[in-house]
Image (cartoon, rainbow, N blue to C red):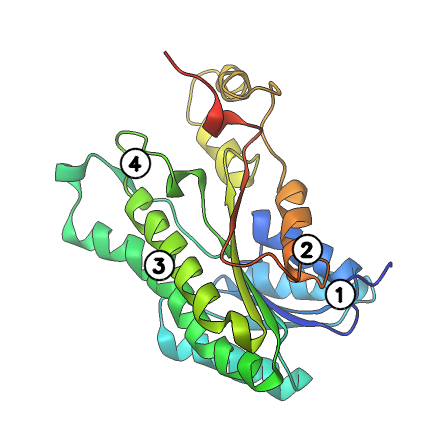
Amino acid sequence: MSGRLQDKIAIVTGSGRGIGAAIAQAFAREGAAVVIAERDAETGASMASALAAQGGRSLFVRTDVADPIAAADSVRQTLAAFGKLDILVNNAGINVFHEPLATTDEEWRRCFAVDLDGVWHMCKAALPAMLAGGAGSIVNIASSHSTTIIPDTFPYPVAKHGLLGLTRSLGIQYAAKGVRVNAIAPGYIETDIARDYWATFPDPEAERRKAYDLHPPKRIGRPDEVAMTALFLASDEAPFINAASIAIDGGRSVLYHE
């Protein structure tokens, strides 16, 4: 353990699996106490237990970020257990993909409740403790959909575009008070969600290869690659990076398309 986050206290939402789990593991390896703020009780408790078994400090708090009371409670329990809060990673999110006019009011609200409102609920709960301590780093997991538009993925990119606005607004507002707010915009990452999607096709391996071929490196990203960027932004190694968004997509977003 090199201790890049030694003695830091971090909340990572949606960290029971996928990118969130990779971030939680990376933070724990670097000395942080990690609060697993996860809606799924089984995966959340399992991740917290795994971190503890590896010698890390961890706490599972069942958290639905769409509920502002639950979001506030996750911060309250963190402060009760560890006395402070240094890092918040807003990773929890859901995919809601439709043709715009086929989007129901319920689907619109479901998307925004988690992908945008949920981030604000967590930030609103966490910021007072960070401001009181004079320091903090918030890392919002955005998406390549935050800057580009793919047909039939509505309203997900609307929420993710809004997330960048939230990131920039909070980052500017609180910069002079020691709190940095940044975003990471992952592209296609090989998570359970991606593998489950490929499995819906007659030839899953062909779908995997199709995804790989869309990217200049002829592969897609890994959760640990997103985690390494989150670790950097959360650490004291990035003191002058604020209100920024870092793309992790192998260069696909700048690839020329005819």
Camera-side mark, 1 or 4? 1
- Residue 159 lies, in percent from the top left, at 32, 51
Amino acid of disc 4: Thr
- Residue at 48 percent across and 15 percent down: it is 203
Q: Residues within 10 Å of mark 2 (few under 14, many from 20)?
A: many
First along the sequence among labels 4 and 2: 4
Q: Which residue is mark 3?
A: 116
Residue placed farthest to the right in the image? 1
Q: CA distance from mark 3 to mark 1?
A: 27 Å
Q: Identify the amino acid type marked 2.
A: Leu
Q: CA distance from mark 3 to mark 4?
A: 16 Å
Q: Which residue does the numbered mark 4 point to in the structure image?
A: 153
Outermost residue, top direction? 258
Q: Are marks 3 and 4 in contact (CB under 8 Å)?
A: no
Mark 2 / mark 1, whichever is N-terminal: 1
Residue picked out by circle 2? 231
Q: Position of residue 227 (x, y in %)?
A: 65, 49
